Amino acid sequence: MAVKYGNLPFSEAIDYFLEKGIVLSPESWRDVWQQAHARAFTVARVTSMDALVDIRDEIQKALDEGISLGTFRKELRKILERKGWFAPRGERAIVELPDGTIRKRLTGWRLENIYRANLQTAYQVGRYKQMTAVKARRPYWQYMSRLLDTSRPTHVAHHEKVYHADHPFWREWYPPNGFF
């Protein structure tokens, strides 16, 4: 999933991610709430700033260079394993450190989730900027669901519906949506 627009880097998506700050969230991504989430990069339960920076740097690399999910997981896994933040297959994700601290290490599915959520968010912010720039000429937007077996019925119900760009629908339904 290269973040590109045609053969060009998707600068709006890249710029959005570059502008985000970094915030530790010890318990849940919900610790960084609502609008702050759009301006701050965080990963739930990653309480080490160097590990969080490593994750952010790999996402930025994926945006800048169009790195695939497989490459992202492979490279980030090596980095996180070295620092004790990745749980190899067959090992428990939750470990107690020598000082008694409990650490919930990342797993392969979480790396995939981090990759997809951050790249899709950056991509959709970029598309939103592009679409609002031409809103006077293209004032209607269409909602599209992926129509997977796992798609929520509410998302499927809105599939292919068209609303004016200023319609309240987009405040809740502009993608990516449904994280809560």
Image (tube, rainbow, N blue to C red):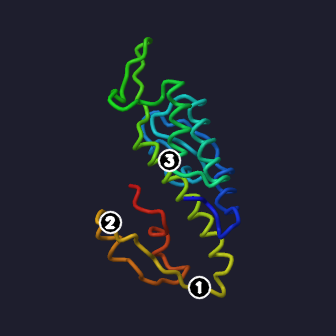
Q: Secondary structure at mark 2?
A: loop
Q: CA distance from mark 1 to mark 3?
A: 38 Å
**12 relative position to 147: left or right:** right
| Residues at circles 1 and 2 in contact by the CB criterion of under 8 Å | no
- Which amino acid does the dot numbered 2 rest on? Ser
Q: Position of residue 55 (x, y in %)?
A: 57, 39
Q: Earlier in the sequence, mark 2 or mark 3?
A: 3
Farthest residue to the top: give it.
98
Q: Nearer the viewer, residue 108 or 35?
A: 108
> Horizontal and vertical percent for residue 176?
48, 63
Question: Is the residue under label 3 in contact with that under label 1 (CB below 8 Å)?
Answer: no
> Disc 2 designates what residue?
151
Residue 17: x and y, percent? 64, 52
Circle 1 crowding by C-alpha within 10 Å: few under 14, some 14–19, many from 20: few
| Location of residue 93 (image quadrant) | top left
Mark 2 residue crowding within 10 angstroms, few (<14) / some (14–19) / many (20+)? few
Amino acid beneath label 1: Pro
Disc 3: which residue:
70
Say which quarter of the image contains residue 106. top left
- Residue drawn at (29%, 66%), measured in percent from left and top? 149
- Mark 3, Cα crowd under 10 Å, few <14 / some 14-19 / many 20+, is few
Please report whichever mark, 1 or 2, sits nearer to the chain's N-terminal start: 1
4 shown above or below 19: below
Q: CA distance from mark 1 to mark 2?
A: 27 Å
Res. 129 image quadrant: bottom right
**Residue at mark 1:** 139
Q: How many marks?
A: 3
- The residue shown at (37%, 22%) is 95
Numbered disc 3: secondary structure: helix
Q: Nearer the viewer, residue 152 or 71?
A: 71
The quadrant of the image that shows the C terminus is: bottom left
The kind of residue tagged 3 is Gly
